[in-house]
Image: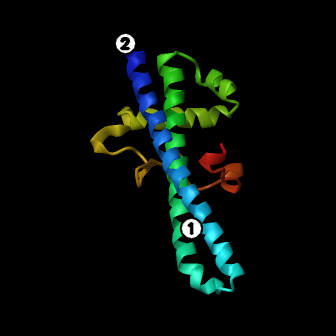
Amino acid sequence: MAPAVGNERLIRKLQHVDVVRKDLAAFLVRLGVALRASIASLRRGVPASSQTPEATAMHVELVHKLDDMHSAVHQARAEGVRVLVEDEGLPVSTVARLMGRPRQLVARLYQQARTANGGPAAENGRRDGERDGRVASDDAGRAPSGAGARTQIPPAAQ
């Protein structure tokens, strides 16, 4: 019955992505209305400086909503990897090939999902490397070296 539990977790993660997507879509509609109103005001000669506070607030909200979307998608991807490895028995290297992603990335996603689901690093009520509800990479405490220090790929681009 373990796959049902794994699937339930994945289903919850995907449902959360959908909720965040709907919120982002609603915001983008409001942003479109605000942009069109701003353009109309500029055409009527209203100074741009009078529109700056509203534009700044909308920008802050956009960044927050995009971050929420990124986080939800990342958590769902990690849980999807965990399901493929633990519930379906696929090796990490096979999952990496299926996803078209480096094995190291898939291994990190797997570890993050295991940690988030009460795996070995979830002792003492806190996850190893946890920072603001997110799990830092395994290299968080080490000094940067090699190509990894020069090339930091954000999780959204991975």
Q: Earlier in the sequence, mark 2 or mark 1?
A: 2
Q: Where is mark 1, residue-wise?
A: 59
- Left or right for 105, reference 13: right
- Left or right for 107, reference 150: left
Q: Is residue 134 above or below residue 41?
A: above
**Kind of residue sitting beneath label 1:** His
Circle 2 packing at 10 Å, graded few (<14), some (14-19), many (20+), is few
Query: Can you give x and y, in whole percent of width and height, for residue 29 in the image?
Result: 57, 56
Query: Can you give x and y, in whole percent of width and height, for residue 114 in the image?
Result: 43, 32
- The number of callouts visible is 2
Q: Is residue 102 above or below residue 93?
A: below
Q: Which mark's residue is nearer the viewer, 2 or 1?
A: 1
Q: In this view of the protein, can residue 131 be seen by the observer?
A: yes
Query: Regarding mark 1 in the picture, which secondary structure is present there?
Result: helix
Q: Where is mark 2, residue-wise?
A: 1
Q: Residue furthest left?
A: 124
- Left or right for 131, reference 61: left
Identify the residue shown where x is 62% and y is 55%: 144
**Kind of residue sitting beneath label 2:** Met
Query: Regarding mark 2 in the picture, which secondary structure is present there?
Result: loop
Query: Can you give x and y, in whole percent of width and height, for residue 18 in the image?
Result: 50, 39
Circle 1 packing at 10 Å, graded few (<14), some (14-19), many (20+), is few
C-alpha span from label 2 to label 1:
46 Å
- In which quadrant will I find the C terminus? top right
Work out whether residue 86 or residue 24 is closer to the camera in this orientation and state it.
Answer: 24
Query: Can you give x and y, in whole percent of width and height, for residue 7 in the image?
Result: 44, 23
